[in-house]
Image: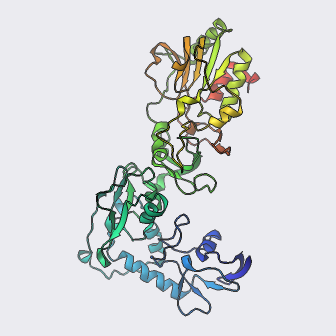
């Protein structure tokens, strides 16, 4: 039921019994908070989200206050400002002065709130600060700095309530309270790195990203993870230095209520490396670099030579638009076309949450085009043209021409065309639940690598595209 409330003398129509902090955040009203997170719910331990409510004697925490008809809320009074100052003073009493070397600098809630509400006169001698562990290895991907922790308990709640693996807890009392791993446990669940995103300060950092790049140099571009057909939404954080290629430094989860919520798996998060390592950059014939005209001439001569005996293999990670162009070209030259999906199945990878056993990000796109997903056991062809499929050995062939994003061991005797990866192209993916998602081009190289559409245009001209 809709009700009327006032926030800082402005009228709002909201749902009755909605959490006040959700209303404030939804309406872009600043409300400082450490412990509250939409995916974890209210905890009420940091007290930073205090607000005044007409008729109440004391300030109330917005993360545990529900909207009622006629409620009047004040977020910017002098007394609330003073409360926030006092809470920050408590948080900073034993906090190290690490900002110049902290990975979280530039995207740290404690930094931001201090600049807005901080008490700038120190009341603590640095030598009196309580010391804790500065470099605790929690597991394969995460480092903990206990001195930076504000005890918001987001990380412990994630391992308790979300993954239910219970690796983390808070031990000690008072100044000795600190986050740590439970006895005989390591933080090694497949979603562990999400606590780095959840941490509002620099207490939890990624081993992979640690000290690699300052956050203010990074551009965050929306995209979709292509580690499986779940289609988790991500941000690609990248930076292009002068005279150098654009470089990806990390993937971070991007909220999508229908697909991945606020999280992604660790393997998907670290898969950005696959877009940059071991890349194919050269046109090759029998292991030797050749020019574009010679490569196209050789390709067209082979198509003419085998014109009644050509097969095309398609990678099930390509965009719909790329698959459609390849399919149209196959029809125009009378070639058979396959995309064997069995090569992408990994039953050891999938789970009941965000990881799918189908490691091809656009398997549904292949099926929507009615491209055959199985190759007959005795199938043979004269010329096989492989558009980046994992396993061209599934088909017996006389000659092989490949369009590859990455260097392959068996390519010395092939004609090889380099191919742009997904972040260097644009197009549409269909995830396992038939949700269509558009991915924009994110990475711009000084010397661009041609996309599938570029090569099809060069080979077939405008009659296909």
**As drawn, which residue projects farthest toward the left?**
127
Left or right placement of residue 424 versus residue 104 in this view? right
344 vs 13: above or below: above
The picture places residue 17, in percent across and down from the top left corner, at 65, 77
- Residue depicted at x 61% and y 24%: 374
Query: The C terminus is located in which quarter?
Result: top right
Left or right placement of residue 73 versus residue 84 in this view? right
Can residue 199 be seen in the rendering of this structure?
no
Viewer-side residue, 99 vs 366: 366
Residue 54's quadrant in the figure?
Answer: bottom right
Left or right placement of residue 452 versus residue 100 in this view? right
- Residue depicted at x 45% and y 59%: 164
247 vs 405: above or below: below
Can residue 377 be seen in the rendering of this structure?
yes
Residue 72's quadrant in the figure?
Answer: bottom right
The picture places residue 220, in percent across and down from the top left corner, at 54, 51
């Amino acid at each position: 039921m809709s009700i009327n409330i006032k926030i800082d003398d402005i009228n709002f129509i909201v749902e009755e019994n909605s959490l006040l902090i959700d209303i404030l955040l939804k309406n872009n009203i600043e409300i400082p908070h450490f412990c509250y997170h939409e995916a974890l719910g209210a905890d009420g331990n940091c007290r930073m989200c205090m607000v005044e409510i007409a008729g109440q004697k004391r300030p109330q925490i917005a993360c545990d206050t529900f909207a009622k008809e006629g409620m009047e809320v004040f977020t910017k009074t002098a007394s609330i400002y003073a409360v926030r100052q006092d809470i920050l003073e408590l948080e900073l009493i034993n906090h190290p002065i690490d900002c110049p070397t902290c990975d979280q600098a530039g995207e740290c809630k404690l930094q931001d709130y201090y600049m807005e509400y901080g008490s700038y006169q120190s009341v603590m001698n640095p030598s009196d600060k309580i010391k804790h562990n500065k470099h605790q290895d929690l597991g394969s991907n995460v480092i903990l700095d206990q001195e930076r922790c504000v005890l918001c308990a987001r990380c412990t709640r994630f391992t308790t309530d979300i993954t239910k693996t219970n690796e983390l807890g808070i031990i000690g009392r008072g100044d000795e309270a600190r986050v740590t791993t439970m006895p005989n446990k390591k933080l090694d669940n497949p979603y562990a790195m999400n606590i780095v995103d959840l941490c509002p300060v620099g207490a939890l950092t990624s081993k992979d990203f640690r000290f690699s790049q300052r956050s203010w140099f990074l551009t965050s571009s929306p995209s979709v993870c292509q580690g499986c057909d779940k289609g988790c939404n991500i941000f690609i954080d990248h930076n292009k230095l002068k005279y150098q290629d654009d470089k990806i430094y990390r993937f971070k989860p991007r909220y999508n209520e229908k697909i991945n919520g606020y999280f992604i798996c660790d393997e998907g998060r670290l898969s950005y490396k696959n877009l940059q390592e071991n890349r194919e950059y050269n046109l090759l014939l029998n292991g030797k670099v050749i020019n574009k005209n010679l490569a196209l001439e050789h390709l067209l001569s082979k198509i003419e030579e085998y014109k009644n005996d050509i097969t095309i293999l398609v990678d099930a990670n390509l965009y719909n638009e790329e698959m459609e162009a390849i399919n149209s070209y196959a029809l125009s030259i009378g070639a058979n076309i396959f995309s064997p999906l069995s090569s992408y199945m990994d039953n050891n990878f999938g789970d009941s949450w965000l990881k799918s056993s189908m490691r091809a990000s656009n398997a549904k796109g292949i099926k929507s085009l009615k491209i055959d997903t199985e190759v007959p056991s005795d199938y043979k062809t004269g010329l096989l043209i492989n558009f980046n499929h994992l396993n061209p050995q599934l088909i017996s062939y006389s000659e092989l021409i490949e369009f590859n994003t990455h260097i392959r061991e068996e390519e010395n005797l092939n004609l090889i065309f380099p191919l742009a990866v997904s972040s260097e192209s644009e197009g549409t993916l269909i995830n396992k639940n038939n949700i269509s998602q558009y991915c924009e081009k994110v990475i711009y190289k000084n010397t661009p690598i041609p996309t599938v559409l570029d090569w099809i245009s060069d080979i077939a001209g405008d009659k296909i595209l």
